[in-house]
Amino acid sequence: MKKYFGIVLSLTLILFASYSADAFVQSPDGEGFNCFAIIAGKNATKDGSVIFGHNEDDSGEQMLNIYVVPSGVEKAGEGFLKAPASKVKAGALKAKYIWFEFPGMSVADAAINEHGVCIASDGCNSREDRKDYTDGGVLYEVRMNVAKFAKSAKDAVKIIGECVEQYGYTGSGRTYSVADPNEGWIVSVVRGRHWVAMRVPDDKVMAIPNYYTITHVDLSDTANFMGSKDIEDYAIERGWFDPASRREFNFRLAYSDPALITREGNTIRHKLVIDYLTDGTYPYDPYGVEPMFTPARKLDVQDFINMLSLHDAVTEGQTKHPARVCSEATILSTIFQLRSWMNLESGCIAWVAPGHPCSNFFIPLRLGIGKEGPKWARFESWKEAEEKHFTDAKDKRKNYPDGAYWKFVDKWNELAEDYTNKIDEVKKENRKIQHRIFRVIEHQDRQLQR
């Protein structure tokens, strides 16, 4: 089995190093439209896998690093632990995980661990203006605790909720998407100690831009919802929900920053993906949009590539636009294909397109890869990367000029100079390469299942 993991990793490094049109995006113009996520339940996909796609959007100089972190015992207080009490006493068994790291960033990293649990997130500002923290609260620690300790998507939800309740969340608001080979969940957290989570139904798809998408909440339905016990009472106390209106409590409308509900960067991107999923039959209303959709057809990885690359709202010739799904700010696009009927090491694949998915093909990294490619890590040791994640995060290109990342930053900048005339040829070549990669993976799958 290991030889097939090696083939995929070798193919990855060769293609990353040689394809002239491949590129990373540099910084956007501070538009603040950060990230987009799509999760499909296992009955909504062609092969019965749970599929989770995510575009990471951020400004500033960014540098992608990829580490394979081994399993082991980690003691409280080490690294970025600040874990919930239920996970750490004298020490805790940490899972092996693939870590997609952006040095210095608190909310950009993604990961998938040995149990097939993956996590990424989208900024969703809340209207909460009160600060309620213990020991400085949590932010970056939330995703790292999931990567290290979650044994299922539902376990990940509990870890996130416990982190928020024990320490308090320091960001305005965020939606974490978590998935495993059996199910997906979205977890919306609010500054302080409030949160709510909703399971993605097996036959549905959820799309998450930069506002909360959870509406109806039923905490008595523990198979499909989790959250703070006072999620509705607190909204009433703050005047965000009036029970006398006789309307059903709506988490999205109660807790969201009201300005985000109709913000073009959210509504257009959200509608683009919903139109793709429903063949344009859904009557989109920013105040009444549902959190989930039944797709017009069953989906596969190519559909996720198509959605994460959407540019339909862009004026001809533009290389950036705040309403794009694939935007000038996109620094990494990942698609986690999670298959329960295969060995997790081979059945769980992270499809990775650094930078714009519109101008990149997606490379598969199986969960069972043994070691990261040397050019995709600043340090030999993942431990050093963890220790210096925040302290060594400036002047990255100057300090690490040999990183493979910069080659693609330069290639994107070159493409962007004449995007209109060059992009069609780039996409044509990408389609050919993507098709070849799909064929390689299909062949390997057959071999691995023998």
Image: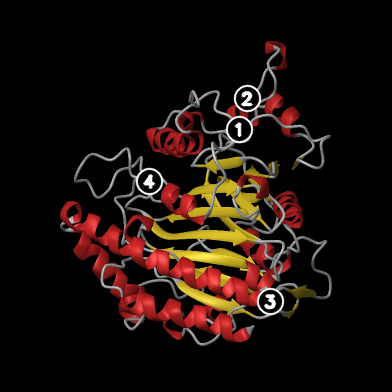
Mark 3 and mark 4 residues within 8 Å of each other at the beta carbon: no
* The image quarter in which residue 275 lies: top left
Q: Taking 338 as reference, is 218 left or right?
A: right
Q: Nearer the viewer, mark 4 or mark 1?
A: 4
Mark toward the start of the polypeptide (3 vs 4): 4
The crowd level at tag 1 (other Cα within 10 Å; few <14, some 14-19, many 20+) is: many
Q: Are marks 2 and 1 in contact (CB under 8 Å)?
A: yes
Residue type (three-letter) at the residue carrying disc 4 = Leu
Mark closest to the chain's N terminus, 2 or 3: 2
Residue that carries the numbered disc 2 in the rendered image: 240
State whether residue 355 appears in this view: yes
* Alpha-carbon span between mark 4 and mark 1: 29 Å
From the image, tell me which residue sits under label 4.
Answer: 310
Split into 4 quadrants, where in the image is the N terminus? bottom right
Please identify, in this view, whether the residue under mark 1 or under mark 3 is nearer the observer: 3
> For the C terminus, which image quadrant?
bottom right
Mark 3 Cα within 10 Å, few/some/many (few <14, many 20+)?
few
Verify CB contact (< 8 Å) between mark 4 and mark 2.
no
Residue drawn 56% across the image and 38% down it: 295
Q: Nearer the viewer, mark 4 or mark 2?
A: 4
Kind of residue at badge 2: Trp
212 vs 94: above or below: above
- Give percent across and percent down for residue 203: 66, 41
User: Disc 4 and disc 2: Cα gap in Å?
Assistant: 34 Å
Residue that badge 3 annotates: 450
Q: Amino acid at mark 3?
A: Arg
Label 3 and label 4: CA atoms lie apart by 37 Å
Q: Nearer the viewer, mark 3 or mark 4?
A: 3
Q: Nearer the viewer, mark 2 or mark 3?
A: 3
Query: Could you say where residue 321 lies in the image, as x and y percent from the top left?
Result: 30, 43
Q: Nearer the viewer, residue 284 or 407?
A: 284
Q: Of helix, strand and loop, which one carries label 2?
A: loop
